[in-house]
Image (cartoon, rainbow, N blue to C red):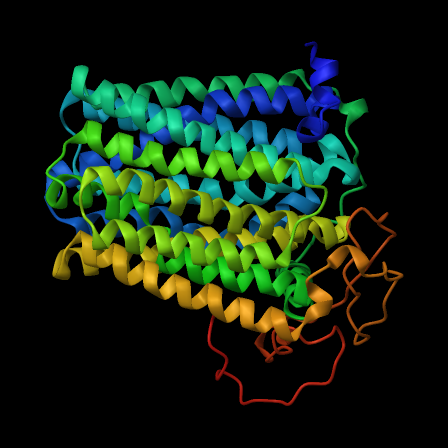
Amino acid sequence: MTVRGLAGAEALRAFRHRNYRLFFAGQAVSLVGSWMQAVAQSWLVLTITNDPLALGVVAAAQWTPVLLLGLFGGLIADALPKRQTLIVVESLMGVLAFVLGALTLAGTVQVWMVLVLAVLLGCLNAVEMPVRQAFAVEMVGREDIVNAVALNSATFNGARVVGPAVAGLAIAAFDISVAFIVNGLSFAAVVVALFLMRDAELHRRPPIPRPRSIGEVFTSVGEGVAYVRVTPLVILPVVVVGLAATLAMNFQVTIPPFARDTLGGDATDFGFLMTASGIGSVAAALYLATRRRPSAWAIAVGAVVLGAGLVMAAALPRMSVALPALLIAGAGGIWMAANANTLIQSVVPDELRGRVLSVFTTIFAGSTPVGGIFAGALASALGPAAALGIGGAATIVVGGAAALWLRRRADLAAPAARRPAALSIRPRGAPLPEPLAPGAATPAVSIAVSPAALLEPGPAVGAPAGAAQPRTRPGTDRRS
């Protein structure tokens, strides 16, 4: 079948766009290398330190910059040309991979070097993640954004199937440095794909005015945060995914010691356990690609399935159980995360897309410093199986709580039925705009928020935009 014929299939609608096909191909290559490095780096740190807690420290070093800088990455996504920004950032990420590969090959690598490189990579991720996610709508337009996000998830998790398995075999057959060098080379694929894109075919909107002072920077960032706080269709996925990621999605910390110490395996077994979770994720992402609209209920269900898979692996710690259990966990995790991403992409105005997505990516990826330390400490004190089981059980509770909340908010169960709200220039202090219905056109929108508003408690989760809320004392809100 031709590319045009494939693009006509329901699950491959985004392939109608040449720029997206280039992006998809480049990412497919680059992400395999990234997963190879993720596996190799975890195994390297565990080999050097022999302590699962060190894995949590490295994970925290890599993702703390996302937690601290991610919101500013969203501002960059809205203010700068996304394609050119990605070319620069992806190139620098390739350089860092080559440096780690050279240090490992020379036999001089130490944990502090891995930590420094992890921090630098985290700073680049703080920019790359919101820019890349916001770039999707420019490649395919709003009508195919749900399909594009689902296919991106399938690519990411397809690489998660191939990358860990290849990394495990490469480490066993050659040297751990090979994984880092291959990752450095793989970034060339995505950079070349970005260079080959046609600007004329991008669905661009004019960038927002660039802030010219520190106050304007914080005001602009605050617009995205304020929109998230008062929009139930956005705050739900942010809260659920943030909690689940903190409690359960710490595979780079928990699975290496689980494979080695609990199951008595080696790097190859670790690679195949990660591959199993990737297979489940790919299956879930491909099914999501056939759907026209995301589901709020799917976010809650995915969290429960993710937790159940981890509890199953912890309760029956043997390879024959761990493989299907991690497949289930992988399916639940991506079903939750991909539906969350597509739900946000479907309702957010284009002018706020980068900043709103940066809130999601900051909470999602930025939860790793807390979750990594939490999981590493549990694995070090109680054992890897206990860390998996406790994280999984807590995630089931999160998913169950989300489901109970959705039962009380039937209007959120079918976001497609919501009417698109008129978005217009808004005077400072006026209510924030309602979310768009999925697929609706995006009128111009301007949201004025003062930096001080970020310190004020926002509406309760699920409250209608602009609804009056009881005030609480500053500082009493818990971070979700």
Residue that appears at 58% across and 52% down: 340
Give the left or right position of residue 120, taking residue 388 as reference. right
Q: Quadrant of residue 190?
A: top right
How many numbered tags mark residues here?
0
* Location of residue 49 in the rendering, given as x and y in whole percent from the top left corner: 11, 43
Residue that appears at 19% across and 34% down: 44
Looking at the image, is 415 positioned above or below residue 140? below
Give the left or right position of residue 306, taking residue 27 as reference. left
Instruction: Using the image as rendered, state which of residue 433 and residue 400 is in the foreground.
Output: 400
Looking at the image, is 236 positioned above or below residue 253? below
* Location of residue 421 in the rendering, given as x and y in whole percent from the top left corner: 86, 62
* Location of residue 11 in the rendering, given as x and y in whole percent from the top left corner: 66, 30
Residue that appears at 35% across and 18% down: 182
Residue 40 seen in the figure: no
Instruction: Using the image as rendered, state which of residue 253 and residue 3 is in the foreground.
Output: 3
Instruction: Using the image as rendered, state which of residue 284 and residue 128 is in the foreground.
Output: 284
Give the left or right position of residue 305, taking residue 194 as reference. left
Going by the picture, which residue comes out furthest to the top? 2
Residue that appears at 49% across and 53% down: 302
Residue 330 seen in the figure: yes
Looking at the image, is 34 positioned above or below residue 303? above
